[in-house]
Amino acid sequence: MHRNMHDTFRPMYWKGGRLHLLDQRLLPHEEHWLAYDNAFSVAEAIRDMVVRGAPAIGITAAYAVVLAARDAWRRAGEAWREAIEPALQALAAARPTAVNLFWALDRLRGRFAGITGDPEPALLEEARALHEEDIAANRRMGALGAELIGSVAGVLTHCNTGSLATGGFGTALGVVRTLWQRGQVGTVYADETRPWLQGSRLTAWELVQDGIPVTLVVEGAAASLLGSGRVQWVVVGADRIAANGDVANKVGTCNLAVLARHFGARFMVVAPTSTIDPQAKDGSAIPIETRAPAEVLGCAGRAVAPEGAGAWNPAFDVTPAQLVDAIVTERGVVERPAERGGVASLL
Ligand code: MRU
């Protein structure tokens, strides 16, 4: 698929029968690739944040199913459909909030019945298709989002929703990338996104890599930034969108939505339809991952809190649909989802 100077890299690839992942824990200091030939190790990689971001997790899991099927075929031959189950369960248990993980596993599983003989070629074809479709969806959302925004002095984004978080190009960051390519944005602000620093470590790295200037802010500066009038749109991704348009995304997203509404900026969510969970009626049905307190009590491997302090570490929050001005998907845009009965029209 075509790339250009503002879209230069992909976070995973399949080569030589193995899945290769860029280790995102080491960025921005080191670009180190890890190779996997075992689905259980890939499940660990997802859990441990080697790869993260909802669509990237789904694509990684799809390639992991190929590895699991190869192993199951070697061990059990025609009984591979039973033998693969433990690996599928390990993948499904890797992280709970990003629905793209379960969506991808279901899609690959949907191919099982039609396969005769060695399952690897058919499942690899499916995983590759899913990967390419994700990039195409991102490009489409980039165009739709940029059209809705038009020309702006500033946008603020949260976490990392770019090439690193997807099959390539990005969701919210794909809109930012498109705005930049078209000369439609003045300043791109990214907040640092504690505790994993996806904003400063990943979004800033990715934008610098792709020649797009970025201005980092600490999350606590968001009110000052939005109050100053320098930002007209907050543009974020999603890990799961409920049927009514409530949005689960990286913790801190809801803060930005509240601030945007208060200060008169607009709030856009950009996500492929694989991030919509029609089973979740509203945000209260979305499982929110709680991660280890150690991630809050320390930073970059060093303690930043005294021994004896505790921490609560929810990795995501839910933004009510009422605070969302637009949900952009590859199938189209829903403006003010709360007034339109959610996102059902997209499915
Ligand atoms: O914990 P992470 O880094 O996996 O969280 C990622 C996010 O919250 C992203 O905003 C979301 O997955 C959308 S990525 C296109």
Image (spheres, helix red, strand yellow):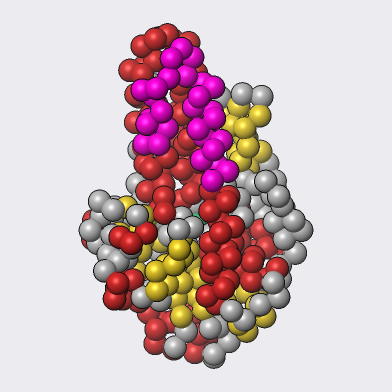
Residue depicted at x 60% and y 74%: 189
Q: Is residue 334 above or below residue 90?
A: below
Count of marks overlaid on the render = 0
Residue depicted at x 59% and y 79%: 150
Part of the protein shown in magenta = 105-133
The location of residue 279, given as percent across then percent down, is: 25, 51
Q: Residue furthest bottom?
A: 228
Q: Is residue 120 above or below residue 36?
A: above
Magenta: main secondary structure: helix
Q: Is residue 258 above or below residue 334?
A: below
Residue depicted at x 59% and y 57%: 139
Task: Between residue 11 and residue 252, name the one nearer to us.
Answer: 11
The location of residue 38, given as percent across then percent down, is: 51, 25
Task: Between residue 23 and residue 306, name the one nearer to us.
Answer: 23
Of the 4 image quadrants, the one containing the C terminus is bottom left
| 114 is within the stretch colored magenta | yes
Question: Which quadrant of the view contains residue 179?
Answer: bottom right
Question: Which quadrant of the view contains residue 162?
Answer: bottom right
Residue depicted at x 57% and y 47%: 167
The location of residue 321, given as percent across then percent down, is: 32, 71
| 218 is within the stretch colored magenta | no
Task: Between residue 36 and residue 64, name the one nearer to us.
Answer: 64
The location of residue 97, given as percent across then percent down, is: 36, 51
Whether residue 156 is visible here, answered yes or no, is: no
Whether residue 339 is visible here, answered yes or no, is: yes
Q: Is residue 343 above or below residue 85?
A: below
Specify whether 203 is left or right of 325: right
